[in-house]
Structure formats: structure tokens, C-alpha cells
Image (cartoon, rainbow, N blue to C red):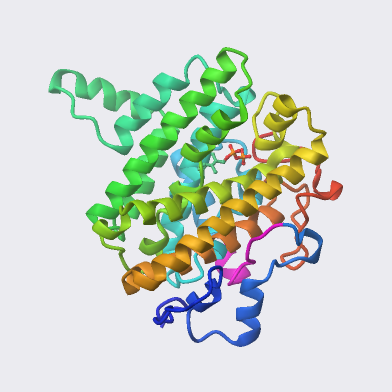
Amino acid sequence: MSLSHTIIADLRGAPPGDLGRLLPTGLGTSAARAFLKPFHAADDELFCPGALREDVALGDFVNEQVVAWADQVGIYSGRLEKLRACGFGRFMMLAHPGALDADRLVAAAKCLVAEWAADDYYVDEVELGADPMQVGSRLANLHAVTDPAQLPRRYAADMDDHHRLQPISVAFRTAMEHLSRYASITQMGRFQHQMATLFLAWTQEADWHANRRTPPVWEYLVQRHLNNYLPPMILVDVLAGYEVPAQEFYQPLVRQAFTTAGNAAVLINDLYSGAQESENDFNLPTVLVANEGLTRHEAVLRTVEIHNELMHTFVGLATQLSATGSPMLRRFLADTWAWLGGSRQWHATSGRYHSAPSSPTSPSSPTSPSSSTSPSSARS
Ligand SMILES: CC(C)=CCC/C(C)=C(\C)COP(=O)(O)OP(=O)(O)O
């Protein structure tokens, strides 16, 4: 039975914030303690769990599969070593401790890497061809792949010819084909919706670049809400082999809880990736510095504070929903919490953000100067 297959059912009376009551049964107490505690004394400021699973061999296996696939479809051409060092397979292993089937992790890792390739090559990295003046049309065309456009016969062949030559289009098409082996129709629909939202957010970011405008903090947060971690998180139940029914998944309070978790998770990305990002890239600390005259250090601390507020909101909502929701929903909220811990661990150790990947047991702190690493990421 998978780690998260049995969730403690009776949450009535659980104090707000006690997500430990949502923990999968079958864990030893020390594993449970590690799951609940911030995993590293140096960044105690972050209210976030650690990873529930560490399986280096599984992470490596998924990573190798995804690098081989990237080579096949043509993304990150000439940069496969840098892609390998990102450890996106390891990310999925850490974030989905309930997924015991390696092939499901590979499917999710392909989707993740397709998303990251679009972000790197179309949106963020000028030296890889990103151009704010082309972001809108590139992403609209890509949307025709993620939610297949139905063109009249006379022009459909032209569109297909275009996408055959775009490695990112091929990456999305093949990744989604792989995912569809495991996702139900409604779970695929969720994923497609999330892609549309992501692409919209990236056009907003391109607008800031094209107009050389730094957004106010609230507008940055709106963009980061659309460009949050829901694209990979939306697969939490797919990977663990169950499905939260659509009528429950889309309940406003459930959506609020899940979105808040996705927003908090993406601030972890802002904290860990800041040192790697090009100067014109936006993250919450840089936007706070520009708008509120904070020092970099103050802006990092404010970002941690905002992250923690979101996490506490998520825990409060999750506790409330777990008392009234279906067993599937309870399990989904616990798996979401596990995802947050795995993601944090990946950010603290990935070669994408650290010149020499940190050992899994000694993650770096986003608030310490030691997290400023040399620019040897897949993007540089
Ligand atoms: C690529 C992906 C998983 C999309 C979801 C949104 C997201 C978390 C990102 C695009 C990553 O944000 P960012 O561009 O800041 O990431 P890097 O710092 O470039 O790694």
C-alpha cells in the first residue's frame, strides 16, 4: 500500500494548523516528526515541511528517463548536462512520496520539463531566444497544442508543420500523451486549464519586459498567483492513483486552499532562484526592493513572512476542509502538504539553483548569503 493510501479519517476537533493529523498512517513517529518540522535549523524562519521521501535511486531513474526524452524531442539541445543537473526527476520523487510507480513520475517530470522549457526558451532567457515581443503569439500557438486547436483542413497541415519543428510543442504533445495514460478526462481537463492560466501569466510578464515596467507588489502577486506551482501540483492525485471528484475539487474553498498552497510554493522558488535570475527578471524580493525601498535582505525576510502567512492560511483551510470533506479530499490535502515539503527540499538542493548540488541532508537556506551561488544553471 502506498504511503498516502490511508489517511487518518477523523479530523474533528483537530486544532487549526495540525496537519499532522492528516499524515498517512504507517509512518514511524520519527518520519512523521521530520515531516512536520522545518527540515533545517538554518532556515527555521520558513514555515514549511521537509520532504517525506528520499529515494536517490528512484530520483536518478526518473531523471535519466526525462533527459533521454528531452534529447529525443529536441528540447535543451546542447544543454542536456545542465538539464540533468537540475534533477527534475528527483523533484518529482520528492514531491510525490505517495507515487510508487516510477512511470507516473516520469510522465509528471516530462510535463514539468516541458513547462520549464517554455519558460526558459520563450519567456525568461534572452540568450536562449526569449523575446517579449513574441511571447504572446508563441504561447497562443503552444496553447493550440495543449488544448488542440481544430482548424479547417486547408490550414491544419500548416499548423502541424509548424509544431513539428518546435521542440517545445513536441515536448508538450508527447508529455501529455504520456500523462493521459494515468489521468482521467477531468484530470486532463484540469491540467489543460492550468496551462492556459500559466500562459496568460507569462504574457503579463512579457508586457512588463516590453514596456520596461516594474509592477507594483500587488500586481506581481497576481501574476505569481497565475504563474504559481499549480501546474505540477495539479497532478498530486493522478500520481498517487486516485481522483478528487470534480465537484469537490472546484469548490471555492478547496480551490482557495489549493491555490494558496501553490502561491506559497512559488515564493520558495523566488527565494531560492533569486541569485540565479538575470537582472531584468522579476521575483518578489526584487519587486519589494523596487517598490518599497527595502534592502535586499529586508526584502528576503518580507518574502519569508508573506510565504509563511500563505502557508498558515493553507493549513487553516486544509484543517477545516478535512473535517468536512471526502476521504479523497483529506488525502489530497495531505498529499499537497507533502508536495510542498518535497518542493522545498528540491529547491534547497537542485543544481538549477546551486553550483554544486547540496547533499540531500544539508540543504542551503534561502535567507543566508551562502545560497548566492554561481550562475551555473540550466538557463545560463
Ligand atoms: C515551469 C513551471 C513548473 C511552471 C510553473 C510556474 C513556475 C513555478 C515557474 C515558471 C518557475 O518560476 P521561475 O521562472 O521563477 O523559475 P526559475 O527561477 O526560472 O527556475
Looking at this view, is 216 or 93 the one in front?
216
Q: Which residues are magenta?
A: 46-61
Answer yes or no: is residue 338 visible.
Answer: yes
- Locate residue 47, reporting x and y percent: 66, 60
- Would you say the magenta stretch is mainly helix, strand or loop? loop
Q: Is residue 52 magenta?
A: yes
**Front one among 50 and 131:** 50
Identify the image quadrant of the N terminus: bottom left
* Ligand 1 located in image quadrant: top right
Residue 209 rendering spot, x and y as whole percentages: 59, 18
Answer with left or right where residue 168 lies relative to residue 343. Answer: left
Locate residue 30 relative to residue 366 in the image: left or right.
Answer: left
Question: Residue at point 54% right, 29% down?
Answer: 219
Q: Which residue is drawn at the image coordinates 64% and 46% (left, top)?
A: 306
**What residue is at 55 percent from the left and 73 percent from the top?**
18
> Looking at the picture, how far across and down is residue 139, in whole percent?
41, 27
Residue 254 belongs to the span the image colors magenta:
no
Please tell me whether residue 144 is drawn above or below residue 28 in the rendered image. Answer: above
Q: Is residue 254 above or below residue 132?
A: below
| Residue 183 appears left or right of 217 | left
